[in-house]
Image: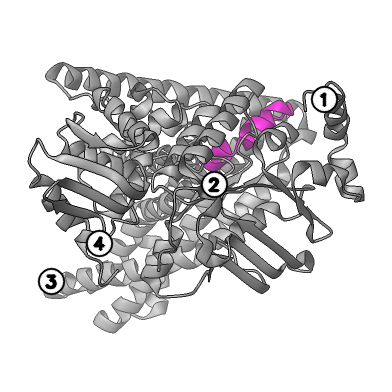
Amino acid sequence: MTGPVVKDPAQFDTSTGGAVVRLEGICTRFGRNVVHEGLDLSIRAGEIVALVGGSGSGKTTLLRHVIGLTRPAAGRVEVFGETLDAGGAAERLARQRRMGVLFQHGALFSAFSVAQNIAFPLRELGVMSRREIDRLVALKLEMVEMEPAHALLMPAELSGGMVKRVALARALALEPELLLLDEPTAGLDPDRSASFIRLIRALHRELGLTVVLVTHDLDTLAQMATSVAVLAERRIVSHASLDETLAADHPFVARFFRGLQARHGQSHGAGAG
Amino acid sequence: MAGRALDEVFVAGASGIRLAGDWTLRGLDGLLPALRRALAAVPADANWSLRSIRRMDSFGAMLLWQAWGGRWPVALDADEAQRAIIGRIGKVTAAALPMPPRISAADAVALLGARLLGFVDHLGGFVALLGRLVLDLAHLLRHPRDWPLLEISANLFKVGAKAMPVSALVGFLIGVVLSYLSALQLRTFGADAFIVNILGMGIIRELGPVLVSVLVAGRSGSAMTAQLGVMRVTEEIDALAAMGVSRSLRLVLPKVVALTLAMPLLVLWTSAIALFGGWVSAWVELDISLHFFLQALPDAVPVANLYIGLAKGAVFGFLIALIACHFGLRVQPDTESLSTHTTASVVAAITVVILVDAVFAIATRSIGLPL
């Protein structure tokens, strides 16, 4: 079943109650270390959700649950309205292809050139000719603002920012409806990270993507996210817009957003908020 | 996707072509072959209406652009967003991806030259590593407290003790086979007693050291290269350098010392087991008793051969470890380089061992031969 699809991303995929990702009662343990306990989170179509939390609070683990790389000890992970292991192998694969993942360090295949990395998922699909694949690769490269001349470079020859952009192009290759970003701007200079944010926002606008990003960077968060999910005390303590999150009365939120609250107050005072 | 029909997305009517539904990679899944045929059959001057398309991605746009032969159709009814997506496809087509350069004859010559220079570079790097090791040894003689004893003993256990079962198994089987084949020949001449000479000389002087070297190069040499290579990839070696810790002293020297010490012992162990295997076969085939075998061995094989075998073991061990470390430290931080260097390390180690073995054979040609 493919959900009814309409042009307006805000109404997209209503058959699933609007939730692209729904986590219910997630419990995760590593040995005796409990990471999540009774965690609930629901992400609506067309949202850009920033997942924030302290180091080691299990943000990346939560992302890996959604991708299906790890299984929670208890609880239910629903993506596009179905649990991760619903349906046969073909349906699971089809569901997997509806999401694109940008790993923290890019995870480009080091034996492949840039173009081959982006072409890989397209080639795996097996419905396109070589010419079509080349054309789509060129388009994705242009989308992430890379020169066509970079197509022949190997991942080892790329700078950190370029690795991130190529990895994003690869994540976008299969036209995903859900994009999962793990620390998309970590390790980028402010200029690069600003252009990366612009890029993702533009893609979100054009393609109507749902985006989940894990980040520590308050600037990234403030400029990108339409809502913020705060992971603390092993569960989601708040999932609301940035303004509401800043107003929330929670010790972790207060500590985490201290810098931003100060700046936010200023910009409101100057009438530029 | 059963029951999907082409007319959900493509309708050729009297007024022209009307497209509908999802023109996305997923939406067109299952319809593609039929759709491609339908698109190819559309006349060049047809009217196109895209108004009923619910959603279009770059794949759908590319299909259309190809169907239009790379230019806008004369009569097109589409909204702004659709035109933007298709327009972007049209733009990138002009600036195609660069093709990988073709290899010409001149490139082949240049490649050959690069290989040769690469070999010289390897040789230089190897000598530099050797020199570094000598300097480290000189340093350790002056500062005995700096000996990396913990690392050496850990490596000794890893390359020595843990290699004993596999080398014993291989040694035993080689001994059995060698003895069996020789026994068949010797029996036809009635020269049964010479089985001791053949096994003793062959195994102690030649086969034992070379056999163990090949095993150790495959087992421990590759592991050393891979370990150092992964440490390069994960920047652990840079972290050591940043702490002011000499990588040659902490990483290379313990491996080289451990393998140089462990190899003679492994050679002794493997040779002994191989001789035992040889005796078992000789006993079955030629009815030679263990007592006779042990008594005849010292007479048939002068003790100098044992020393030559042990010395070979030490030299081979030194070379294998040094070559493994040399290649390990040259790994570039990517998976491809790791695999090529690990392979190159094992191949180079085995080749060098056999070359040096030939040198040994010439250098020791007048020693330990009972003539």
The answer as to whether the residues below labels 2 and 3 share one chain is yes
Classify 10 Å Cα crowding around label 4: few (below 14), some (14-19), many (20 and above).
some
Q: Amino acid at mark 3?
A: Phe
Circles 1 and 4: CB distance less than 8 Å?
no
Residue A116 seen from this side: yes
Classify 10 Å Cα crowding around label 2: few (below 14), some (14-19), many (20 and above).
many
Q: From the image, tell me which residue sits under label 1.
A: A267
Q: Earlier in the sequence, mark 2 or mark 3?
A: 3
The answer as to whether the residues below labels 2 and 4 share one chain is yes
Q: Residue at x 77, y 23 (%)?
A: A272
Q: Secondary structure at mark 4?
A: loop
Q: Residue at x 49, y 68 (%)?
A: B165
Query: How far is the residue under mark 1 from the one under mark 4?
Result: 52 Å
Query: How far is the residue under mark 3 from the one under mark 4?
Result: 78 Å
Horizontal and vertical percent for residue A187? 64, 31
Magenta-span inclusion, residue B231: yes
Query: How far is the residue under mark 2 from the one under mark 3?
Result: 43 Å
Query: How far is the residue under mark 3 from the one under mark 1?
Result: 104 Å
The correct choice, above or below, for B171 with respect to B10 in the image is below
Q: From the image, tell me which residue sits under label 2.
A: B259
- In this picture, which residue range is highlighted in magenta? B228-245
Horizontal and vertical percent for residue B354? 32, 43
Query: How far is the residue under mark 2 from the one under mark 4?
Result: 61 Å
Q: From the image, tell me which residue sits under label 3.
A: B189
From the viewer's perspective, is the residue at label 2 or at label 1 nearer? 1
From the viewer's perspective, is the residue at label 1 or at label 4 nearer? 1
Chain letter for mark 1 = A
The answer as to whether the residues below labels 3 and 4 share one chain is yes
Q: Secondary structure at mark 3?
A: helix
Q: From the image, tell me which residue sits under label 4.
A: B30
